[in-house]
Image: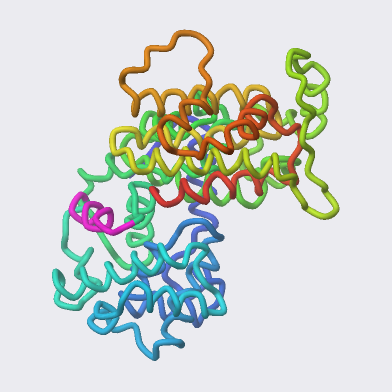
Amino acid sequence: MFTSTDPRIVSLLEHRKATRVTGGGQGLLGASADVDNLLRSDSMAMLTGLVLQRGMPAERVWQIPMHLRSKLGHLDPARIAHMSVRDMTIIFDSLEVRPRYPAQAAKTVVALAQLVTNAFGGDGSSVWHGRAMRDVIATLQSLPWVGPGIAHMAVQILMDEAGYEPHADELPSLDVKADVHVVRVFYRLGISADETRDAALDAARRLHPRFPGLLDWPAWDIGRRVCRPQSPACGECPVSEFCERRGVGDTQEGARELDETRSTAVTVSPVVADDQSGVVSDLDGDFWLLLARLLEVAMQSADHGGVAHRFASVAPLLITNPDLARAQCQVLATELLTARLPSSRSIGPVDVVALAVSAGIIDASQADTLRKCFAHMPTKVRTADAVTQILQTVLALGR
């Protein structure tokens, strides 16, 4: 039903068909038959796993409902709905496999239980069964910390695993969840113009308009397993025959070459992570703190959600092109801060740190150190995945 003549799209869909075994207790969701059986038999378990898909590997997130049931002795939405967020946070903190953000997860799950109890008669499957796709997405996005990415991904999983059948006319509006893996694979394949979330969304809509979201799983699977940020295993990639390999050569070797041509106008010494110990200097940590706080503000600014997602697109550049990454961070931060300070009409270079201080995002006492962080991006960090994790720590809240 969904066809494309672009060999890159065809190869992605073939990979999905060959590897995305659904609904058969294959350990596909939770990496164990017991977990998968619970997810497929208990709608509250399925919903809980869906809405917590942020900030950690999917297989571990899928295990959380089972551990939560073991701790509580149930997954009764009516009983969970009467729990306080604080009590649920304590429960999550005590689990063997716990969410990366226990307090946020607690707020999400308690709100989910209240929604299922009050709006759907305690039946979690009623959230999706027999409902229009746009209504399912809107319901999921009404929960704290559940954004469009998670909601659209959830619908695709419900289609694969729970028998949900939206009308075919709705499928063109079901997007990919443009996380770092999907963004990277789309860019390297040459189907998206830039290594950004917006470009990935546009590519899926343009090249597979009848069902853009169908490209999500194969790109995500390839990105996390073989198309790594550094040293991608191109020989193991199922779509390598058609891949343009854009940016693949810009690995650590490329980063060293870039470092040799860095501008001499900056006099601050670069901060380098210790590969053996994993210790990052305080200066480096302050840089991430600034980014995290800017992202928090972006998450709180309804009109500028796109700015937050654009911060994530900087992540792949932090290894391969630190100068460009720093410049893009400055542009994005300036856009965000200027939007919050309408009187600002600065032209040319902008002191982002000063704007952050004036906006109350950071404390004035941190300004000098943070200005040095912005003045010279670290030339090396421990792993690209670590960079992505740091940026997505806050970004994931809005997805």
Instruction: Write down the region rendered in magenta.
Output: 134-144
**Residue sticking out furthest to the front:** 365
Assess whether residue 141 is covered by the magenta stretch: yes
In the depicted view, which residue is nearer to us: 344 or 273?
344
Residue depicted at 41% across the width and 84% down the height: 69
In the depicted view, which residue is nearer to us: 299 or 127?
299
Residue 232 coordinates in the image, percent (x, y) = 72, 42
On the picture, is 118 further left or further right than 394? left
On the picture, is 115 further left or further right than 182? left
Residue 155 coordinates in the image, percent (x, y) = 32, 56
Quarter location, residue 47? bottom left
- Relative to 228, does residue 119 appear above or below in the rendering? below
Residue 243 coordinates in the image, percent (x, y) = 62, 32
Assess whether residue 61 is covered by the magenta stretch: no
Quarter location, residue 234? top right
**Residue sticking out furthest to the top:** 347
Q: For the N terminus, which image quadrant?
A: top left
- Relative to 299, does residue 112 appear above or below in the rendering? below
Residue depicted at 50% across the width and 82% down the height: 34
In the depicted view, which residue is nearer to us: 38 or 73?
73
Residue depicted at 16% across the width and 59% down the height: 131
**Majority secondary structure of the magenta segment?**
helix
